[in-house]
Image: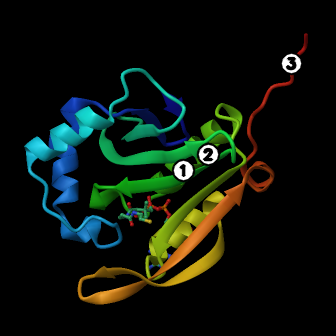
Amino acid sequence: MLEGRIVNLRPQELTDAATMQRWVNDTEVTATLGNRYMWSLAAEEEHLRQRAPKRPSFEEQLFAIKTKEGRHIGNLGLHEITAENRGCDLGIVIGEKDCWSQGYGTDAIVTALRFAFSELNLRRVELHAYADNERGIACYRKCGFVEEARSRQFAFRNGVWRVGVQMGVLRPEFEALHGLKLKEATA
Ligand SMILES: CC(C)(COP(=O)(O)OP(=O)(O)OC[C@H]1O[C@@H](n2cnc3c(N)ncnc32)[C@H](O)[C@@H]1OP(=O)(O)O)[C@@H](O)C(=O)NCCC(=O)NCCS
């Protein structure tokens, strides 16, 4: 378990499928995400089964975001981790809408970035958001991400072409903002 200030990051379990299916079928939650399809419980269970590595691996890190009281409120993933470039893509959803704008997303991302930089030895983490996802972008800025590029007609959602924003954070920038809590070896 990775311990944040107000959330913990735990592995995703097959028993999370029903909760995740509720989020992925909630159009208010998915309005700022890539997903546009309705998911059956069987599809969600299969998705979880397929993505669960036989044993923990470097290439992809999938977490359930839990409050300190143990409520599963969202998911976070570090995807396409490459050793050569020491980078990855971050994705996040806080699926429980009553938990939006309370600092959970920021704490989950800061916790995942600490892990990415101090355990996986990554150098750069990037993410993609719709330019009108103001809450998301405000959250990412607090974590240390800066805007790097914009893509026109990035995605067609709800009848509208959406502009995409790519944001990235480099390890020294994150360290200056949040610290990595690295301990000096004494021997
Ligand atoms: C985007 C998301 C991960 C952010 O997590 P969160 O827990 O809601 O975010 P936080 O509370 O940590 O930070 C959000 C910040 O944006 C602010 N905010 C909220 N609405 C805003 C708006 N319309 N404009 C500007 N800022 C806004 C909040 O006040 C907060 O800032 P503060 O702490 O300085 O007050 C979460 O809202 C979510 O999962 N939304 C639905 C799915 C999604 O968009 N996923 C990301 C796709 S890229």
For mark 3, give the secondary structure: loop
Q: Which residue is mark 2?
A: 113
Residue type pointed to by label 2: Leu
For mark 1, give the secondary structure: helix
Sequence-first tag of 3 and 1: 1
Q: Residue at x 54, y 32 (%)?
A: 58
Label 3 and label 2: CA atoms lie apart by 21 Å
Q: x and y percent of residue 53 in the render?
A: 37, 28
Mark 1, Cα crowd under 10 Å, few <14 / some 14-19 / many 20+, is many
Ligand 1, image quadrant it occupies: bottom left
Label 2 and label 1: CA atoms lie apart by 6 Å
Q: x and y percent of residue 174 in the render?
A: 73, 52
Label total for image: 3
Q: x and y percent of residue 166 in the render?
A: 57, 71
Label disc, if present, on residue 185 of the rendered structure: 3
Residue type pointed to by label 3: Ala
Is residue 141 visible in this depiction of the protein?
Answer: no
Q: Is mark 1 within 8 Å of ligand 1?
A: yes
* Lateral position of residue 39 relative to residue 74, left or right: left
Q: x and y percent of residue 93 in the render?
A: 37, 56
Sequence-first tag of 3 and 2: 2
Does residue 73 lie above or below 4 as drawn? below
| Circles 2 and 1 in contact, beta carbons < 8 Å | yes
Is residue 57 visible in this depiction of the protein?
Answer: yes
Label disc, if present, on residue 90 of the rendered structure: none
Q: Is mark 3 within 8 Å of ligand 1?
A: no
Q: Nearer the viewer, residue 80 or 142?
A: 80
Quarter-of-image position of residue 184: top right
Q: Residue furthest front?
A: 84
Q: Which residue is mark 1?
A: 109
